[in-house]
Amino acid sequence: MFVDRVLVKVEAGTGGSGQTSFRREKYVPMGGPDGGDGGRGGDVIVRGDRNLTTLLDYTYRDSWKAERGQHGEGSNRTGRSGDDVVLPVPPGTIIRDSRTKELLGEVMEHDDTVLVAKGGRGGKGNAFFVTATHQSPREWQPGEEGEMRTLELELKLIADVGFVGQPNAGKSTLLSVISAARPKIADYPFTTLSPNLGVVPLSDHRSFVVADIPGIIEGAHEGKGLGLQFLRHIERTRLLAFLIPIDAMDWQAELDQLRHEIASYSEELAAKPYCVVFSKLDLLGEHYIPEIDAGAAFGLYAISAAGRMGLDTMLDGWWRQLLAMRAIAEQPLKDAQLLP
């Protein structure tokens, strides 16, 4: 089961209290205060784990609490700090406070960490309060309480190329042919009910990641069909491939409708580089690219996933576009290195 949004209650550990203690030792009549400080409460940390692909585990357990700090002891012994609690999540997870909607952080890579609830500070023991005029203090501090939050964890898949198309446009079939992924494929709408990722291998050890997203229908930006579930995931892709079956009634109208849904949901998403892929070319038996107004598309491709037609040209075009985007992204870093 693919789970991409969960609510999780977390509570950091409370700090240990300080101790009131006086040194009691034979032949030492004026031992003085020696109460130690309390230990720090454990933190709650979210950490990226590349071995995870879903938030399913958090549907079985939705409450996590870090260990509290131990109280201080005599002989100036500080209490042991509480252990942290680490919540593993898939890369691509956004963490928000569910009440305030504050963005607490994003986990983008393996081992990325975000502190989501800070443990309480340990209280001071009476040894801390000694002064020249107050040599036998009995004061002590209680430990501070740890932070409590209800987190909203939302997973947005990270892929280089995202497939955009209506149900039965051939997205899952294409994914199964160009990668090792094996999504469910059937001849009825919404066969794909959850996103699927696949790694596309090329020659010379080159590869990139593609995402097969549930089909988009008119009104998807308003939540119709699988709507917002689809659009949330497509946000993280670097470029879009609009798939239009060659047997569509009106190629131009279908492309315009898909682009309209994308733009209505997010202008940033609509500004991503995109191409148009005409699928199911095997229905014609010949190579044919329809003439349509594709706007600023970086390429028009006609393919048959089932017949293995036109795939190499399409994959090469995707790779060249990804390289161009990478070069643009790296240029500011190179310019910064050249500055004195």
Image (spheres, rainbow, N blue to C red):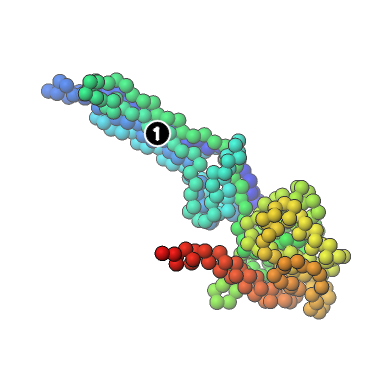
Identified by mark 1, the residue type is Arg
Residue 187 shown left or right of residue 146 in the figure: right
- Residue at left offset 60%, top offset 58%: 158
Q: Mark yes or no: residue 69 visible.
A: no
Residue 275 shown left or right of residue 100 in the figure: right
- Residue at left offset 48%, top offset 67%: 334
Residue 306, image x, y percentages? 75, 72
Q: Mark yes or no: residue 289 visible.
A: yes
Q: Which residue is mark 1?
A: 121
Instruction: Examine the image and state in which quarter residue 135 appears.
Output: top left
Residue 2, image x, y percentages? 65, 51
Q: In this rendering, is residue 138 above or below 312?
A: above
Judged from the image, the secondary structure of the residue bearing numbered disc 1 is: loop
Q: Camera-side residue: 247 or 128?
A: 128
Q: Residue furthest bottom?
A: 286
Q: In this rendering, is residue 74 above or below 211?
A: above
Instruction: Examine the image and state in which quarter residue 17 appears.
Output: top left
Residue 230, image x, y percentages? 71, 53
Q: Residue furthest front?
A: 340
* Structural crowding at the residue carrying mark 1, measured as other residues with C-alpha within 10 Å and reported as few (<14), some (14–19) or many (≥20): many
Q: Residue furthest right?
A: 249
Q: Camera-side residue: 122 or 181?
A: 122
Residue 43, image x, y percentages? 45, 40
- Residue at left offset 70%, top offset 58%: 270
